Amino acid sequence: MGYLDLGIRALHEAYLRGETTPREVAEEAIRRAKESKDNALEATCYEEALSFASSLEECEKDNLLWGVPYFAKDNFSTEGVETTASSNILKGYVPVFDAEVVRRLKEKKAVLLGKTTLDELAMGGTGTSGHLGKTYNPWDESHRRMVGGSSCGSAALVAAGAVPFALGSDTGDSVRKPAGYAGLVGIKPTWGRISRFGLFPFAPSLDAVGYFTRSVDDAAILLETLAGRDEKDATSSEKSVDSYANFKDISLEGMKVAVLDDLMDTIRERKIARDIERLLSCLEKRGVEVRRVRFGEEMLRSIYITYFVISCAEATSNDANLDGIKFGPYPGGNTYEEVMAKARTQGFGELIKRRFVIGSYSLMRENQEELFLRAQRNRKKIVGRTNEILEECDFILTPAAPGPAPFFDEQSDRLSDAYLIADNHLALGNFAGLPSITLPLSFEEGLPLGANLTGRPFDEKRLFALSSLLEEETGLRNLSVRERKEGSL
Ligand code: GLN
């Protein structure tokens, strides 16, 4: 056990007592990150981090993030630190400014150690498509399983116990899915709750800053700093920032939790479904009302394709600035078209190209009605149904995925309900801009399983309150693979 295994509050108390220093903790975090063999890092700034940590002398009493080391996904701008979004098209790009979340963390004197791997440009869910290849799941030492994506490196390093938290981004499930596969808490707050200034856009109507922690308490502490209006992002909300970390004040008596029976039907026979049921009975004993609802199977089945059309269309238009001129290696050529064609042919991986083709195809005038606009209309229907459920109930509880982290070469039938519904439903939270959090649920043969809770817009404080109750019931808090090695799991 070390200070990094304790959680943010306990680390802060150790700083206050003068037992350790940010420099010592950063050194230990760097040692652990170097020990991790999961291919989770794009770039590091260890020297700058150590000199910044050394400059922190007197612990600030009310600043829980003082001296806390962390990593950021490599699609956040970081001044002076190479940022590629795991794409060759951005090779060598060094931003001249910090993303707002990075700026806020710096102001709080949290210590940035480096940038983590992702699926190229955050498009993907496997952690295999970045330019550095696969990122591995730390819970599987044989390196045969994915940690999931797209925020793969951040998930891997928090699960490895290197840092108490790491930043990610979530457009469809990119924080909440890997959190489930890695035994972590992963949250995507309400759309607009956290400024996205300096986060590379993927699909702005769906994108949210998210992050990984090892406890609900740490997630709530962080949101107090990360949330809030930022003039540099016109889509950031003006709503005041709650005292999220005081979620213990909230009574859960009489709260209603919806379970989507048609989703559960697709995975009935699996351990994860039984563990969700067990959790539901615990909640009932604690005074929470559980309501079984059917979302509408056909609508659930349409989430994935709707997400795909909308996100690819937005991505292709957002990423038009990656043309080989403004950022990354300049490939040469006589005309703009030639430069752009060369840069994009060399710079993008196959999966990205495929998504841009689909995106552009859906946006073509002759296809728009049948693809893009149809997807938009369907999104509206899905959001309408979600909101209906959330009018009756305070939260929706689901598994984060149909099972534990898959093998890299595992084939799933992409037209099955288990895939279309149980593997892709988390995009509901992005369609409707809702706060949504994944928590560790249980273990299956040494691999973590995750549960997910989604709530009403800007209801993060109550979401934390219920999450903390679930955390108490499962007893799964501050998990990392180090504990397993030390024999306490
Ligand atoms: N897995 C989804 C995709 O492939 C989600 C990506 C994300 O949330 N960034 O697009």
Image (cartoon, grey):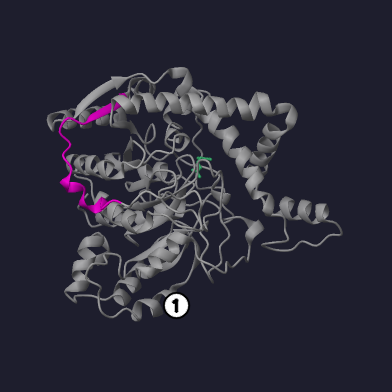
The x and y percentages for residue 260 are 34, 24
Task: Report whether 465 appears left or right of 30.
Answer: left
Label 1: element kind: helix
Q: Residue at x 24, y 27 (%)?
A: 277
Task: Report whether 206 appears left or right of 441.
Answer: right
| Picture layout, residue 300 above or below residue 81 | above
Residue at the spot of label 1: 47
Quarter of the view holding residue 101: bottom left
Q: Amino acid at mark 1?
A: Glu
Magenta stretch, residue numbers: 242-259
Residue reaching furthest to the right: 334
Q: Say which quadrant the N terminus sits in.
A: bottom left
Q: Residue at x 53, y 25 (%)?
A: 378
Q: Is residue 369 visible?
A: yes
The x and y percentages for residue 77 are 53, 62
Task: Report whether 353 appears left or right of 215.
Answer: right
> Is 255 one of the magenta-colored residues?
yes
Q: Residue at x 27, y 64 (%)?
A: 4
> Is 89 one of the magenta-colored residues?
no
> For this rendering, which residue is in front, 27 or 110?
110
> For this rendering, which residue is in front, 333 or 148?
333
